[in-house]
Amino acid sequence: MQALAVAIQSEDFSVDAENADLLRQSNNTGAIANFVGIVRVNNDRLTVVSMQLEHYPGMTEKSILRVLQEARQRWQLNAARVVHRIGELHPGEQIVYVGVASEHRHAAFDACAYIMDYLKLQAPFWKKEITANGAHWVDARESDSIAAQRWSKP
Amino acid sequence: MLKVLFFARLREELGIGELNCAAEQAATAAQLRESLVAANGEHWRASLFADNIIVAVNQEVVDWSQPLQAGDEIAFFPPVTGG
């Protein structure tokens, strides 16, 4: 088990099991911060029946690992991991897990938010929503690039 | 040879996810995009030249001026929407 880890999988994940792994591979951890993304029931006022997640195998893992490495350069991190699901998902299901272990809470909170902001901008995943009105590819949001800009402020 | 990949909306619009292309046809990513339109018909232009299309060479996002060489893997895709 490595201190920085990325898993792309169609199966669901257990937050407890992921956090236990995170703790097992780190020393003197005093804080774990998590983010868990969930498929919404309503997106842009349409009822989502299911969602299809496509990715670019190879590049996805590399790009997320790079974000984890960048986070480790900015904050004191003992371990960090990302699990991202692909394939068919339904409302209420978990999509993505981010776990960060650090000695103190501020580093864990901030690194977790940073990792999620950059994953959204850089990791090659694409969502297609299947709604009662038909299927469509989800558009990228301007707010996601604005969210990541806060990390470049001095 | 160049290995060319298309993802998501582009893959659906073009009806193909992967193709091979002679390396001599394209010295840069921009030239490859033009030669794909020339080889496959003008209907490819609307998809490949849509706003915000991203190009990656060997799994790194690059500028359109990126030089290409035989054996490269080039991917075209729309803005990403994971997480």
Image (tube, coloured by chain):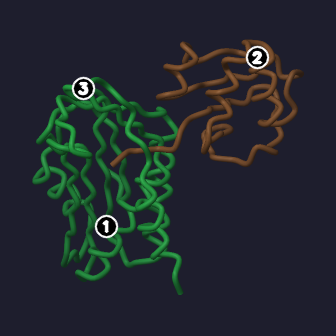
- The x and y percentages for residue B65 are 82, 45
Indicate which label's residue lies in the foreground, 3 or 1.
Answer: 3
Along the horizontal axis of the image, is A85 left or right of B39?
A: left
**Front-most of A55 and A66?**
A55
Q: Report the front residue among A81 and B45.
A: B45
Subunit that carries the residue with mark 2: B
Q: Residue B66 got which mark?
A: none
Crowding around mark 2 (Cα neighbors within 10 Å: few <14, some 14 to 19, many 20+) is some
Residue type for callout 2: Cys
Q: Name the colour assigned to chain B in the rendering.
A: brown
Residue designated by label 2: B21
Image quadrant assignment for residue A138: top left
In the rendered structure, the colour chosen for chain A is green
Which of the labelled discs sits on residue A112, or is there none?
A: 1
Relative to A141, B35 lies left or right? right
Where does residue A48 sit, x and y in percent of width and height? Answer: 19, 34
Badge 3 and badge 1 in a common chain: yes
The kind of residue on which mark 3 rests is Asn
- Mark 1 crowd level (few <14, some 14–19, many ≥20, 10 Å Cα): many
* Residue at 60 percent of width and 40 percent of height: B59
